[in-house]
Image: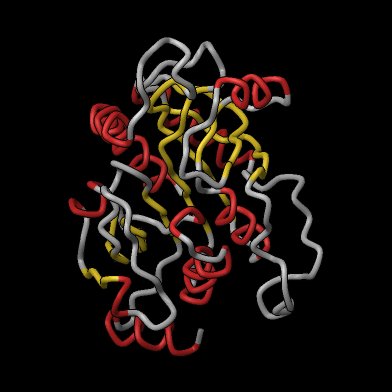
Amino acid sequence: MENSVEYIKNKIGDFTPQIGIILGSGLGELADEHCDTAIPYVEIPGFIKSTVKGHKGRLVFSNISGKQVVMMQGRNHFYEGHSLKDITYPVKVMKQLGVKTLILTNAAGAVNESFTPGDLMLITDHINFMGQNPLIGENDDTLGERFPDMTEIYKTKLINLAEDRAKELGIKLQKGVYLANSGPSYETPAEIRMARLIGADAVGMSTVPEAIVANYCGLNVLGISCISNAASSTGGIKLSHEEVIETTTKAKTGFKKLILKIIENL
């Protein structure tokens, strides 16, 4: 951790980010448009390389609306064969760099039948179906307590802020519960019916590990999903990663406007 933080600080100088953003599939353009300094993950001690199409794998630093921001342009996933500790390591580094608020984004499949591809959903809570927890193992008391409370991972004040800013911009927002599976296979129709029964509104393969660790570290968390597809191919349409990228690309204009407006008001 000390090596990671020292390496990054040598690159960014006295830049002290207070806002962190993890950009999911197809949403990395925000970092391209607002980039003062970029560091590839492969150069940072302790970081691992992203192997997923649509994830550039860079830590990007930028001044946005007078706020100092660090963005993960792409994330790593459990299904790539990484441990949850490796996946969530950058969140701990962000904490050490000074981040207080973390905005998590992803592309997700719709479980709620009222959602349509291209919708943006504020995450109000989550269900961890990945079969593991990133906090398993020896606890680091300097980062957080052994048994962290998970009652309000996604802060109500940030959800309200996002809703207010979306209204200003004329952007329709859904709200709901995000369920995380390990992937990389998409869910079966039976699994989606189960997810619906237990209260999920959207399903994906990321975000939950980072949210758990961010909350454990005392960060204020806001989660936003871009609904990229119906969660199972019951309508006869074959699901693909290309479809996910295509839909998030179409939705990115509203997504970027909303994120920038949220940053401006933090």
28 lies above or below 3: above
Image quarter of residue 9: bottom left
Image quarter of residue 260: top left
Of 33 and 158, the residue lying toward us: 33
Color scheme of the displayed model: secondary structure
Q: Position of residue 258 (x, y in %)?
A: 36, 35
Residue drawn where x is 46% and y is 44% of the image:
184
Report the side of 15 relative to 92 (left or right): left
Q: Position of residue 213 (x, y in %)?
A: 62, 61
Q: Position of residue 75 (x, y in %)?
A: 40, 57
Q: Position of residue 39 (x, y in %)?
A: 26, 72
77 lies above or below 68: above
Report the side of 5 relative to 201 (left or right): left
Residue drawn where x is 58% and y is 42% of the image:
181
Residue drawn where x is 41% and y is 54% of the image:
21
Residue that extends furthest to the right in the rendered view of this protein: 147
Residue drawn where x is 49% and y is 64% of the image:
82
